[in-house]
Every structure is written in structure tokens, then in C-alpha cells.
Image (cartoon, grey):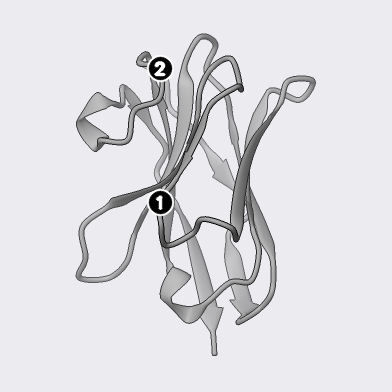
Amino acid sequence: QIQLQEFGGGLVQAGDSLTLSCGIVTGCAMGWFRQAPGKEREVVAVISWSGTKTYFSDSVKGRFTISTDNFRELVNLQMNSLKPEDTAVYYCAASLRDLPTAMRDYDYWGQGTQVTVSS
């Protein structure tokens, strides 16, 4: 069983930037999800295994980027212009599908890392 591990969460102020990282799984698309208190888990960003395709939710488009570091075998979520509403537990996930956005299409998950954005 593959267990993913997220790195980089923390407490920041509104407008700050933060980068989350997670180990990639060979052959898998990598996605980032988040879950705020009292809300359902939602997709944030996805990158295909080839790295040529990406997806961003409307709420983060233009502020977040997703990339892979093939040398260090990491997927990074660069979060810029953070807002209090970005506060959530962020999860890394891996999928054998091409560019999935639904939770059910992911095969492996991390345990999550807390991101808190203060106003």
C-alpha cells in the first residue's frame, strides 16, 4: 500500500505564499485536494503524469500553480495570494487516470497537512 506524505503546511497571513510538496507516484497523475471545517473535500489542482496537462479549480485559478520536480520526485503546489478562505487541510493524492478531478478516481492518499491563513 502506497502512503503519500505532504510537506509544507503552516500558518501564514493573507497575501502570503506557501508551497506544499508531496512525493510523486510513478505513472500517476498527482492531485491536491483540500477540506475546510464543515465542508466537503474538494479538488484544488491536478497534474498529469506527463506534466503536460493541468487542472485548477475556479477558486484558485491564477493564484496556485502545480508542478513536478522530477529530480527530487516531488509534486509541488505553489500557493500565492493566499486568502483566509484557503484555510483547510490539504491532501495529496495519486491516480492511475489521466487528469482526474473526482475523489473516487484517486488510488492513493496522504494524511493531509494544515494550511491556515489569517486575515
The residue carrying mark 1 is: 57
Three-letter code, disc 2: Asp
The quadrant holding residue 97 is top left
The mark found on residue 98 in the picture is 2
Question: Is residue 67 left or right of 57 when viewed as pictured?
Answer: right
In which quadrant is the C terminus drawn?
bottom right
Q: Which residue shows up at 40% across the image and 25% down it?
A: 99
What x and y, as percent, mark residue 11?
59, 74
Q: On the image, which quarter does residue 111 sit in?
A: top left
The answer to whether 22 is drawn above or below residue 57 in the figure is above
Q: Residues within 10 Å of mark 2 (few under 14, many from 20)?
A: some
Residue 5 against residue 24 in the figure, above or below: below
> In terms of depth relative to the viewer, which is nearer, 91 or 101?
101
Question: Upstream in the sequence, badge 2 or badge 1?
Answer: 1
Q: Position of residue 42 (x, y in %)?
A: 30, 51
- Furthest residue toward right: 71
In the rendered image, the vertical position of residue 78 relative to residue 76, given as above or below: below
SS class, disc 1: loop
